[in-house]
Image: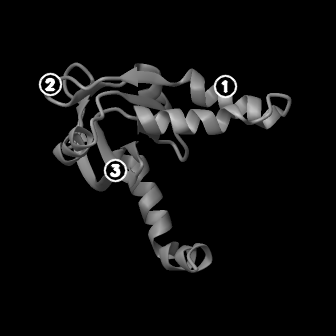
Amino acid sequence: MFYGEYLHTLDRKGRIILPSKFRDAAKANFVEKFYLTRGLDKCLFMFAEEEWKLQEQKFRTMSFTKQESRKFNRIYFSGAVEIIPDKQGRILVPQYLKDFAGIRRDVIIIGVSNRIEIWSKDSWGEFYNSSKESFEDIAEKLIE
């Protein structure tokens, strides 16, 4: 549902505008509400409500008696916030999530099929530059 890479800037109030392609995809799929939380690799994950519920169900089945499960769920769910974009497609990212992802001004918003990722421009650049050379090797290992 969400595809592409877009450069955006926080406005004076600390809001990010979602790319129009993402707003169009959300509208076409009747998505009004999202959930934003701490992601992996120093980015934020943003899920449409229906996808969030699927992810939540999956993580809920993890045993709370296992320390790693408890740690992951605490960090993942304590960071979660319900997001409803305004009429212009802007979202307000809480300061603790901006701090987690190192977001100050410029952000890269990427579509990763069932989720949106929000990166600081610098973190995305580091990730992309360190990963692009191994893209074909990774594909060879993962795709049959």
Say which residue label 2 marks: 87
Label 1 belongs to which residue?
Answer: 74
Q: Which element is circle 1 on?
A: helix
Q: Residue at x 24, y 46 (%)?
A: 25
Quick check: 35 above or below 117?
above
Q: Residue furthest right?
A: 65
Q: Nearer the viewer, residue 12 or 23?
A: 23
Q: How many marks?
A: 3
Mark 2, secondary structure of its residue? loop
**What residue does disc 3 label?**
110
Query: Disc 3 to disc 2, how far (Cα)?
Result: 21 Å
Query: Going by the image, does 76 lie left or right of 85?
Result: right
Q: Nearer the viewer, residue 31 or 20?
A: 31
The residue positioned 38% from the left and 48% from the top of the image is 122
Query: Residue pushed farthest left?
Result: 88
Q: Circle 2: is it few (<14), some (14-19), or many (20+) Cα within 10 Å?
A: few
Bin the neighbour count of mark 1 within 10 Å (Cα to Cα): few under 14, some 14-19, many 20 and up.
few
Q: Is residue 30 left or right of residue 57?
A: left
Q: 42 or 65: nearer the eye?
A: 65
Residue 51 lies, in percent from the top left, at: 46, 39
Which is closer to the viewer, label 1 or label 2?
2
* Residue 50 found in image quarter: top left
Q: Would residue 102 be seen by someone viewing this image from the given angle? A: no
Please name the amino acid that badge 3 sits on: Ile
Q: Which mark is residue 30?
A: none
Is residue 41 in view? yes
Dots 3, 1 in contact, CB < 8 A = no
Local crowd size for mark 3, using a 10 Å CA cut-off: few (<14), some (14–19), many (≥20): many
Amino acid type, residue under disc 2 in the picture? Lys
The amino acid type found where label 1 is placed reads Arg
- Residue that appears at 73% across and 30% down: 71
